[in-house]
Image (tube, rainbow, N blue to C red):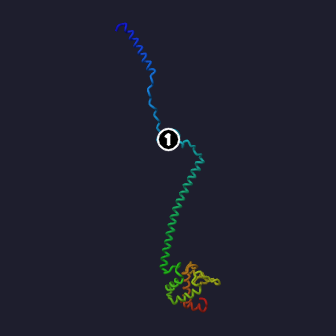
Amino acid sequence: MPSLIRPVVAVVAALTLGAGMTGSAHAAPLPQDPPTPVAPSGDGRTDQTSREQQRPELLPDVARAVNSREAALAKTQAEIAARARSLQAGDFVKQRAAAEKTIRYADRVKKLGYDPKKTPPKDIAKKIALDKYDWGKDQFSCVNKIFTQESDWKWNATNPTSGAYGIPQSLPANKMASEGDDWKTNPATQIKWGLKYIKERYGTPCAAWAFKRGAGWY
């Protein structure tokens, strides 16, 4: 290259290099990536303190009172449940006992041939007179006359003067207890005692009636 041209080239190269450096100093910055959001924790809470953690702790006395109350409530609930089970078991026992009592009473009625609670007293007397003493219709007619005059077959008939009581007018009344503790209310018990009394004292109902007709009592 000729010597005259070299200085010119050097000047041009210097100017070009300077212009490039000035432009790069004022160039716009490159865009940056947005910040990565913080993911929530696994239990749905952020790093902030939970409300439960922000609540003040109970005072020791209050905590003990609450615990005591909860224990008492649990005990009461357990007692109620136990009581309910006990009542259910008790009802079952009562029902079973009532059913067994009904069955026993039905067997007794079948054996006796009459129901002490429902059968009319005259029919009860007919059955007992025939089964126990072999007294048929003739003898029973005398039984009927005696008891009709004495009490009209009423189990609660009471003589206001002497205190004689019941269908056979037992005197004293508690003599009939020899035939059963229910002598005050059970016609069958009273009749059993009356027929036994007639048998032991007179032999037959008609003999007792004959005596009564003359004496007014038997």
In the rendered picture of this protein, how many numbered marks are placed on residues?
A: 1
Residue furthest to the right in view is 161
Q: Which kind of residue does numbered mark 1 sit on?
A: Arg
Q: Nearer the viewer, residue 15 or 199?
A: 15
Q: Position of residue 105 (x, y in %)?
A: 50, 76
Q: Left or right: where does residue 165 sit relative to residue 17?
A: right
Q: Is residue 54 above or below residue 185?
A: above
Mark 1 neighbour class, 10 Å CA radius: few under 14, some 14 to 19, many 20 or more: few
Q: What residue is at 50 percent from the left and 89 percent from the top? A: 137
Q: Residue at x 54, y 59 (%)?
A: 80
**Where in the figure is residue 59, as x and y percent of width and height?**
59, 45
Looking at the rendered image, the quarter that the C terminus falls into is bottom right
Furthest residue toward left: 1
Q: Secondary structure at mark 1?
A: loop
Image coordinates of residue 90 in percent, x first then y, are 52, 65
| 112 and 28: which is toward the camera | 28
Name the residue carrying label 1.
Answer: 45
Query: Which quadrant holds the N terminus?
Result: top left
